[in-house]
Amino acid sequence: MKDLFSLGKAAGSKAGLPPGSIVYVGREREGTPRLSLIQYDGGGAEEHVLDSVDECRDRLANDKVNWLNIDGIHDVSVIKSVGEQFNLHPLLLEDVANSHQRAKTESYSNTVFTVTKMLRLGNDNEQIIAEQVSFILCGNLLITFQEQSGDVFGVIRDRITTGKGRVRNADAGYLFYSLLDAIVDSYFLILEFLGDRLAVLEDAVTTDPQPDALAHLHRLKHEVVYLRRCVWPMRDVVNSIMRDTGGTISDSTQIFLRDLYGHIIQIMDSIESCRDILSGLTDLYLSMISNRMNEVMKVLTIIATIFIPLTFLAGIYGMNFEMMPELHWPWAYPATLGVMAVIAGGMLVYFRRKRWL
Amino acid sequence: MKDLFSLGKAAGSKAGLPPGSIVYVGREREGTPRLSLIQYDGGGAEEHVLDSVDECRDRLANDKVNWLNIDGIHDVSVIKSVGEQFNLHPLLLEDVANSHQRAKTESYSNTVFTVTKMLRLGNDNEQIIAEQVSFILCGNLLITFQEQSGDVFGVIRDRITTGKGRVRNADAGYLFYSLLDAIVDSYFLILEFLGDRLAVLEDAVTTDPQPDALAHLHRLKHEVVYLRRCVWPMRDVVNSIMRDTGGTISDSTQIFLRDLYGHIIQIMDSIESCRDILSGLTDLYLSMISNRMNEVMKVLTIIATIFIPLTFLAGIYGMNFEMMPELHWPWAYPATLGVMAVIAGGMLVYFRRKRWL
Amino acid sequence: MKDLFSLGKAAGSKAGLPPGSIVYVGREREGTPRLSLIQYDGGGAEEHVLDSVDECRDRLANDKVNWLNIDGIHDVSVIKSVGEQFNLHPLLLEDVANSHQRAKTESYSNTVFTVTKMLRLGNDNEQIIAEQVSFILCGNLLITFQEQSGDVFGVIRDRITTGKGRVRNADAGYLFYSLLDAIVDSYFLILEFLGDRLAVLEDAVTTDPQPDALAHLHRLKHEVVYLRRCVWPMRDVVNSIMRDTGGTISDSTQIFLRDLYGHIIQIMDSIESCRDILSGLTDLYLSMISNRMNEVMKVLTIIATIFIPLTFLAGIYGMNFEMMPELHWPWAYPATLGVMAVIAGGMLVYFRRKRWL
Amino acid sequence: MKDLFSLGKAAGSKAGLPPGSIVYVGREREGTPRLSLIQYDGGGAEEHVLDSVDECRDRLANDKVNWLNIDGIHDVSVIKSVGEQFNLHPLLLEDVANSHQRAKTESYSNTVFTVTKMLRLGNDNEQIIAEQVSFILCGNLLITFQEQSGDVFGVIRDRITTGKGRVRNADAGYLFYSLLDAIVDSYFLILEFLGDRLAVLEDAVTTDPQPDALAHLHRLKHEVVYLRRCVWPMRDVVNSIMRDTGGTISDSTQIFLRDLYGHIIQIMDSIESCRDILSGLTDLYLSMISNRMNEVMKVLTIIATIFIPLTFLAGIYGMNFEMMPELHWPWAYPATLGVMAVIAGGMLVYFRRKRWL
Amino acid sequence: MKDLFSLGKAAGSKAGLPPGSIVYVGREREGTPRLSLIQYDGGGAEEHVLDSVDECRDRLANDKVNWLNIDGIHDVSVIKSVGEQFNLHPLLLEDVANSHQRAKTESYSNTVFTVTKMLRLGNDNEQIIAEQVSFILCGNLLITFQEQSGDVFGVIRDRITTGKGRVRNADAGYLFYSLLDAIVDSYFLILEFLGDRLAVLEDAVTTDPQPDALAHLHRLKHEVVYLRRCVWPMRDVVNSIMRDTGGTISDSTQIFLRDLYGHIIQIMDSIESCRDILSGLTDLYLSMISNRMNEVMKVLTIIATIFIPLTFLAGIYGMNFEMMPELHWPWAYPATLGVMAVIAGGMLVYFRRKRWL
């Protein structure tokens, strides 16, 4: 929930600063950002942990793909020095530091800048952790910024290290695509997670609706809305990359981006179905509750309408009038009981006719 | 229900693999895929059951239409060898193996690749069976992949064998169209199946709404949503085939594709109407239930409001006070009964005025 | 209702046939189709009832407008012979025979083919009768297919016979427009019919909502949805005719088509308003019911809460304990009655404060 | 309400007539149409009341702006003679006479034809009066048709007479704009009128919802829907005038039309907000009612659940068994009363825990 | 609420005036408008408080950026004299004075005119204050009109004075952007304010729904609708400025405008999510209420159905018939109590089976 409105908060806390101010707006974090540089070509790959951005500059290899990954954007000085070293536009750096961006792609002369949301399940498998990942693609250098250590890029690193797959023989654009693909894959995992919970809820509502079901539905809807907000702009992102970037992305990578675009459409499709089912489920739940209340009311009505007249009859003969001739008739008591049985029986027949029984 | 979110599941289980990895993600199946090659021209048609993809390569006839059908995509090695023999893009093969694709068409140089969902009713006529069918059209060769044996193409095979209809005198593009047409026809059958169930439900809700009606409505809605998800992208598929493929589809086949496009629009139209009716039916059902509860409440209220005051009156004269002069009046008992009758009558008049009776 | 899903049914019963198969899918009908040929020019008009399609071919006059009308498409042989005589595409003939088409326009070389739905009120003025009318415009020949005899074209025939209006001096394209205009006029009549019923329902719901109102609303909604499905594609139909057909439609007729287009927009507009009102009416109805239940509950609550405590009090002094000193006090009975009156009065004041009375 | 479906009615009553038939379809009116001709240029302005359309023809001044206003379209002969005098297309005249048109603009060679709805409040300030106004702009002649006398153009006439504002120095196109502007201003007044009523309803629903509130909401919704139907097409109207008319509208007037367009967008905006608020208000109302019923139910439940067990207890000791030892214990009566008090107290504590009190 | 329909009111009170009439339509205000002129270039900045518009004209410096800010548009003479001094179009001045404009941008030859809404929180932090700000950008002169003193531009003034940020070295176009940016930042603050209140409401509804929650939801919805109406047109505004204005906005500022555009999209996104959550919350609230009523009903039903039959039984043996043999059996009383216990126990078992307990 907090995440949902954090957009407003982030920007709010920055209001009043000049555009291009690089200010970190996320949760408070400690520790130094971790810089790592992976360099590879068809021949091999090596990873360096760096002390400073300057060191990266020195190590850059023009004939290799250079992937500079920075975990931690709370230390704004690192972002600033990246900006200086690679001559980046201040607005771009501002967007990197502002961890509440909507996913988007922008091109600054020869640089492609992309912001995305990476989603993961927390360790308890119960919570969705969102993290902003920014990409700066500039020739054969790809810079990625993450909010904290831990990501969904492990498989890509493995492929680079072991030389499996296409990535080690391809350019930085393909690396960029691979990372985007890993992020979109993470959406599939979240979608599966939400889909499972939806299926559980659906079973629960259909068989035995509990009062807390609606709160669960509400929370699930919240999360689907959040996922939707992450995925929706990705369509434009991939679309822009495919259309706008001229020579940055090679033609062979374009086919992969087209495939990625298809995946995003597929996720959006599933999300819309989720929303449909969720709203149908809410209706179903309310109707189940209403059905139950109906049943409760019926029981009450049947019991009350049968016994209230009988009790009245018993009350009549419980009156203490002196002159009540029936009281003295010997068969009055069994006759009264008989009348009561007839009334009760009549009621039951009536209810059966009304199909309440 | 499971099918609905299987998109997420499929992709989820593949997360972490490099793009282009050919992995089967559907239900586990056993047995060897069945390969059959149908070759025909105006003069005649013959069908071969093949042992391997290599055999197909050898048998290909340039002057005939070649239709290679493969039942079973769980054996990834077959897909791979098809890819090698016919030099297909890895992403294309990945999509063939991933049985949770959204319908789509893509063109790779001289190859048209199309993924669709084929729907059938199960043997019990109660369940919808969805199966992914992939088409690869490349010159006079059409390759189709199905998940399992059993399909809706029997009529096409008959026409090829017997030489009825236009298909045997036409090219592979027309065969491709014919198979797509058979798939779209299968949607009509499913739509009819759902429409029949909707009509039954509509009758049931209008005449005598049962508590389980809403669960039925919910399930039906589920299936309509699923059908919609299958049909919706078909529009783009046929549209793309009509626009994009240059020389692959001949002009005379274009008219048939236009007709097919019209059919898809018609199905989408009917599905939207179904959804309208379904949502109206849900409202109707809830209102019928509410009407009933209203009626139940009225009976309770009438009985209770008539007898509660009377019972109170009887209670009064059931008190044991020594000094209750009424008890000794000789006409007190009949008078009390009379007063009770007047009260009850007044109530009845009041209720009739209120139109509760 | 049946009509609504008949699209699915029609196509379903044709599934398995090759494209271009001419199969009638509507209700079973008997009798021979009736063929009539009207020929006219500025000088005069004459009508012939024909025995066969061949006869038509012979009678065609190049310097006149020829209107061949065929009532009855259940005899497929007639459609086939029309196809042969005038050299029409098989898909076109298939669409003529399939009486469950969505309205559409297609152009085949020099032929314009249009399918529409003609709506009429039944003899009882209670039911809407839908009939498919197909138009084939080819030079100065217009062929129309209807499902049965009886149509909304009487006025056009009169104008041709009597020479009133513009039609006799115009070409076949104007005749085509005139018939389309008559069909669109029939939608206005149906709209008026539905609007009247809606107004009646609105009055009924606002003044005295009956339990069956919602079923009426549901049926009306059904019919509005059906009308909408007929009208919606007409927009594209007229639009296509205006744009696509090159020389078939003369410029002076274009202005009339533009006017017709305006009428269709107007109907669509009114239908949308109808839907708005209908859905508002459903809400209103449900709220009226809910208001009533509220009132019922209030009466029950008032009666019960007043008398239940009093009855309890009476019950207290109906107990048979030996040691109940109150029973022997001489003023106990009137005092008890007084206490009861005070309680009842207090309750009434409370209820008035709560604004329940 | 009647107005809402009058579109259908109007066209319905014309069904069967040839296109271009000039038939008045509105309410029956009597009296002769009033023709007035205002002629002005920068130098001065004069108004003539005319006897016939012929007289207008004679009086036309080429060097002045001529505004012919006709109040009353029920006398079709006047429309016809206007058509003859100024050589207008029959379809145009048909639209003038049919008072149930949707707002639209059409251009016939050098003539711009526009239909709009003018809205006014009735004398009782309670009802909205809609009237169709048609404009025919042709060079320096502007013809306007109104259904009856009384309009919102008084201010324009004043400006022409007194020479205030820009209008007297501008061309007929500017006069046309000024009249459209007056009509759009009338929508603002109606919007204000509806907004005021909405505010009143909102207060009423929030503080003390009455049963009739929903009917009021429904009526208001009706009127908002009607206003929307009037305003919506005006956007296209102004847009078409700005784009289509070539030299008819001068460049300096274009800026004013752009401003007018902005006003229409603003009204549409406000109408959408109105609809939002209205639908929210309906929900609020239903919930207030539901809250109330909840409160009623609580009171009933509290009273009933407290007294029913106590009454049962009193009933126990009201039984007439011979062998009830408790009846003879001296402290039995006060003890029973004490137990009753404990039960009642316990119930009250329970209800407070449940937060029902 | 008042603000919402003020659009209508404003225009309504102007109806009847010629276009271009400069009339103030907002709340009545007193006092003289305050005119201040800020002039700056890279070298320094100075601010003058002016007595009249004429003084501004004299002071204009061609080699500096001139920012003329006017607080107070209720004194129309000031607006008029600005119009005369700088030769502005009357429609533009009319829009400045009409404080109920929708945000829009228009270009008049070399002048860019923009209207926006500036939102602030009132001093009590409870109310949203909306104020219209108009911008006229013309070369190196930027004129801003505000309704009253107090704005969100303080930070911009500080940056100009102190020379911080980019603004002092940039042109008037960048100043224009900076002010727009400050206004959009103010929307973020309002969004945060609304988001906080939504979160509070969400907690309240989920844990303990109070009857007034819906009214709060309704008010919040009102404000979200209002914010939406302010933000929505801003998208077009920024878009128009980016596209239309030719040389007025320099290329380097374009990048900043693109960033601003992204912010607006982000706000719109958040607003849509807000609306989603709000509507979900309304459903949740209604369901919580319904759940509660259900619980209340259950308690009532359980108590009533248990005790009503028992009370009836007690009533039976409270009858005064002479011939009731049971009354004389010694074990009748305990047996009756036992039967009652069995009935009550059976009921409890039944309710537990029904899962009501």
Image (cartoon, coloured by chain):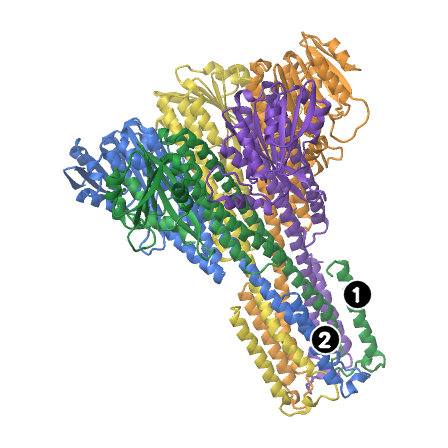
Chain colours: A yellow, B blue, C green, D purple, E orange
Q: Is residue C132 left or right of residue B247?
A: right
Q: Is residue D53 left or right of residue B118?
A: right
Q: Quadrant of residue D347?
A: bottom right
Amino acid, disc 1: Gly
Q: What's the chain of the residue with tag 2?
A: B
Find residue C251 and report its horizontal and vertical position in percent.
41, 29
Badge 1 crowding class, 10 Å Cα cut-off, few under 14, some 14 to 19, many 20 or more, is few
Q: What's the chain of the residue with tag 1?
A: C
- The numbered mark at residue C346 is 1
Q: Between residue B257 and residue E143, name the one nearer to us.
A: B257
Q: Between residue E179 and residue A123, name the one nearer to us.
A: E179
Amino acid, disc 2: Phe
Residue shown at 62% from the left, 33% from the top: D70
Task: Decide: is D175 above or below A355.
Answer: above
Count of numbered labels shown in the rendering: 2
Find residue B41 and report its horizontal and vertical position in percent.
17, 36
Task: Decide: is D113 above or below E308.
Answer: above
Find residue C184 and report its horizontal and vertical position in percent.
45, 42
Please tell me whether mark 1 sits on a helix, a strand or a loop: helix
Residue shown at 53% from the left, 66% from the top: E353
Q: Quadrant of the C terminus of chain C?
A: bottom right
Cα separation between marks 2 and 1: 18 Å
Q: Between residue B72 and residue D286, name the one nearer to us.
A: D286
Whether residue A145 is visible, yes or no, is yes
Q: Is residue D37 left or right of residue C66?
A: right
Q: Is residue C203 left or right of residue D106?
A: right
- The numbered mark at residue B108 is none
Q: Between residue A198 and residue A241, name the one nearer to us.
A: A241
- What residue is shown with label 2? B312
